[in-house]
Amino acid sequence: MQVLPWPVCFLYAGRAAFSIVLNAPSPEPALLTARQMADRFNQQAATFGHQPRITARAGFCPPSFG
């Protein structure tokens, strides 16, 4: 099985925050891992009294201007 790099975009409150690249056999497991990471980030945020606002989607985040 070949493992390749797949880009993932993390969003905060629906807005692109940052991209990472995860190594996985296909985009689906990479996105699953990213969503698990987002769940963990949200759990930590809730621990400190913040709203859970992190999500993840496949692909690089779009570039931001301004």
Image: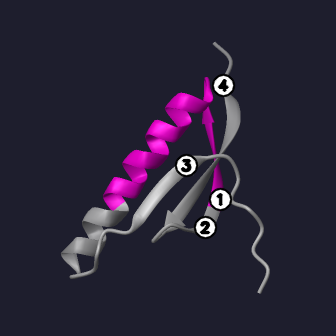
Asked if 49 appears above or below 8 in the picture, the reply is below
Q: Position of residue 64 (x, y in %)?
A: 75, 74
Which of the 4 quarters of the picture holds residue 23? top right
Q: Position of residue 33 (x, y in %)?
A: 46, 41
Pointer 1 residue? 19
Q: CA distance from mark 1 to mark 3?
A: 10 Å
The residue located at (33%, 55%) in the rendering is: 39
Residue 16 numbered tag: 2
Q: Nearer the viewer, mark 4 or mark 2?
A: 2
* Cβ–Cβ under 8 Å for marks 4 and 2: no
Q: Kindly report which numbered mark, 2 or 1, lies closer to the viewer in this rendering.
A: 2
Give the labeled residue for mark 3.
57
For marks 1 and 4, the one nearer the N-term is: 4
Identify the residue at the far front of this view: 14
The residue pinned by badge 4 equals 3
Secondary structure found at label 3: strand
Q: Nearer the viewer, mark 1 or mark 3?
A: 3
Q: Which residues are magenta?
A: 19-40
For numbered disc 2, what is the local secondary structure? strand
For residue 57, side relative to residue 4 (left or right): left
Q: Secondary structure at mark 4?
A: loop
Q: Secondary structure at mark 1?
A: strand
Callout 1 touching callout 4 (CB < 8 Å): no
- Residue in the image at 62% along x and 66% along y: 18
Mark nearer the N terminus (4 vs 2): 4
Query: Label 1 near label 2: C-beta < 8 Å?
Result: yes
